Image (cartoon, helix red, strand yellow):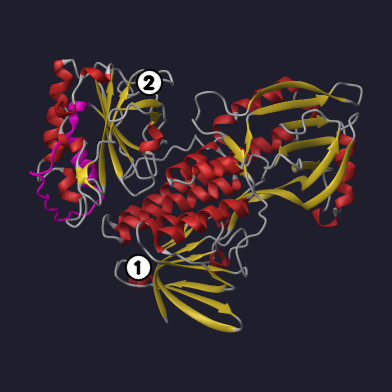
Amino acid sequence: MEKVDVLICGSGSAGLCAATWLAKYGVRCKVLERRDGPMKMGQADGVQCRTVEIFESFGIGEELLREAYHVLEVNFWADNGTGAIERTGWTADTQPGLSHQPHVILNQARINGLLIDLMQKYNDQQIDYGYNVTNVKVDSTFAEDHDAYPVKVTAEKDGKTEIFAAKYALACDGAHSIVRKALGYKMIGDSSDAVWGVMDMVPRTDFPDIRKKSTIRSKSGNVLIIPREGDSDNLTRFYIELAPGTNPKEVTLNNLQAQAQSIFHPYKVEFVETIWWSAYAIGQRHADFFHKDHRVFLAGDACHTHSPKAGQGMNVSLQDGYNIGWKLGEVLTGLASPSLLETYVIERQKVAVDLINFDRYFSNLFSSGASTSPAEFQEGFIKSGKYTAGLTAKYEVSSITSSLESTNLASNVAVGMRMPSAQVVRFCDSKPLHLMKSLKSDGRWRIMAFVGDLTVPENHTKLNQLGEYLTVADGPIQTFTPEDQDIDSLIETILIGYGNRHGIELEQIPECFYPVSGKYQTRDLHKIYYDDESYNNGHGHAYEYLGIDAAQGALIIVRPDQYVSAIIGLSDYSEIGNFFAGFLQRQTYVAKDTKDTPK
């Protein structure tokens, strides 16, 4: 019987994102996939702003953006009362200030490919194809023994049965999850009467907005138009509302095409080539339980299903894997207590319930017909923008989401939500870049010190006191950093000053903000930033954007997944140690001799 630390059932978005995190931590896992090879053409394609941010943090954002279609504008069309459609409005797809990254469209097969390439790069993590998981059992008597392998997974390949023993298992095996059924868990919710068809095709049409995301609401039904990646062949996706009571299994491609042509009147549309199509009834459901003994965790479609029109499915699933992946990595490398895994259920179960409620609202908005005016529909669509961008998740208080939050310190930053980003200027080379660039998905926690104007003596005194606290042997950094690792390997300190960056010298900043680290043990000068005018890119006004008063500053603790754990005052730095002591394991770090290292 093969023993593995983590067994992942399914290589969809959730499974691959979790496996990528584990590979980054150096943890080998077993990924079992029933298909005989990687996905060749996925059904999902919408990549929300938050997901693009995640890919950026993994270092693969540029590839994603280069290949994708960028959704910049949404156009609204409706019946003009004569049976013909006309444009009733337009808006930015992502409202200004929500994210520095756009909403894009890229086939899920390519999205998966980027993650597969990355996990192979990290530690040569592979996927085992052709395995059908048939059963999963957890021996609850050993669930509290953190060295035990209480999960038994049975799978078949080429007619042979294999059994794997695992410390942890992830059910990422889709809406018809075998793992979920083996655990006896059920999906709660219902199917609506609404039936929709979807097709990827190349249209030949005189409709003017075919290369823009558009909604059409006509007397013949509704269509959502999603342009696909690639400029040369006009590949486009149509979501088409079908008549209530339609049996999805009886729908034909001719039905979808005829319905679309009727909705587009008076514009003409021909279908040059259809790549893929399907029909489905909308269902909104979530699992009644998301874990078994905190040893098996459900993720992705295995624990939530909904309609695809809001572009949430692949994104929420991927973010499930993103959430559990780093937590398993910290537990299995001895950095954090196993209790950390309990936060996955606290956080992602609420996200799933919120997703179902939003999808019900969004689906009703699309299907509301004449009861919603074009102006009301457009307003509802715009109000939903922050959710569809993936930026509304707010995690409840837990060991890693502190109740330490003062709205007068950073009024536009919320504990439990993703850290907003604004442009700053890097101190060492005057390069303008977004703060999010410093929040890489590399397993590190961040203490972000917004210290204000350091030419003000009081601010400089507070900074020196903070630096002393972070440097002492019994401080949080040395207490929780493993002895064989660089001092910034687990908890990274980042300084964001305010005002004229040329009014301060490096030696006036505590050395903990430019520690000795890396292969060559040189000082890392890339952790100090200023909210200042750049040479060619303007001023980011980061303090104003985040709601931080430069006169008092703030300390913000950010998790490895870019979510905010705590917001505290500069003088309340002792709370940092109390926070990390709640879940990190004490280590035996020994400071390296850096006396000969020049500043």
- Left/right of residue 337 with respect to residue 162 in the rendered view: left
State the residue position of label 2: 534
Tell me the quarter of the image containing the N terminus. bottom left
Residue 238 position, x and y percent, is: 77, 42
Q: From the viewer's perspective, is residue 403 above or below residue 307? A: above
The 10 Å Cα crowd at callout 2, few under 14, some 14 to 19, many 20 or more, is some
Q: Which residues are magenta?
A: 570-599
**What's the residue type where badge 2 is placed?**
Ser
SS assignment at label 2: loop
| Residue located farthest toward the bottom when viewing the structure as drawn | 160
Displayed quadrant of residue 382: top right
**Foreground: disc 2 or disc 1:** 2
**What's the residue type where badge 1 is placed?**
Ala
Q: Is residue 26 magenta?
A: no
Residue 74 position, x and y percent, is: 68, 28
Q: Looking at the image, which residue is at 36% across and 53% down?
A: 327
Q: From the viewer's perspective, is residue 1 above or below residue 47? A: below
For the residue pair 45 and 418, the one nearer the viewer reads as: 45
Displayed quadrant of residue 231: top right
SS assignment at label 1: loop
- Left/right of residue 216 with respect to residue 544 in the rendered view: right
For the residue pair 77 and 184, the one nearer the viewer reads as: 77
Q: Looking at the image, which residue is at 41% across and 48% down?
A: 346
State the residue position of label 1: 143
Q: From the viewer's perspective, is residue 79 above or below residue 175? A: above
| Residue located farthest toward the left when viewing the structure as drawn | 595
Q: Is residue 588 magenta?
A: yes
Residue 574 position, x and y percent, is: 16, 35
| Residue 416 appears in the figure | no
- Left/right of residue 213 with respect to residue 249 in the rendered view: left
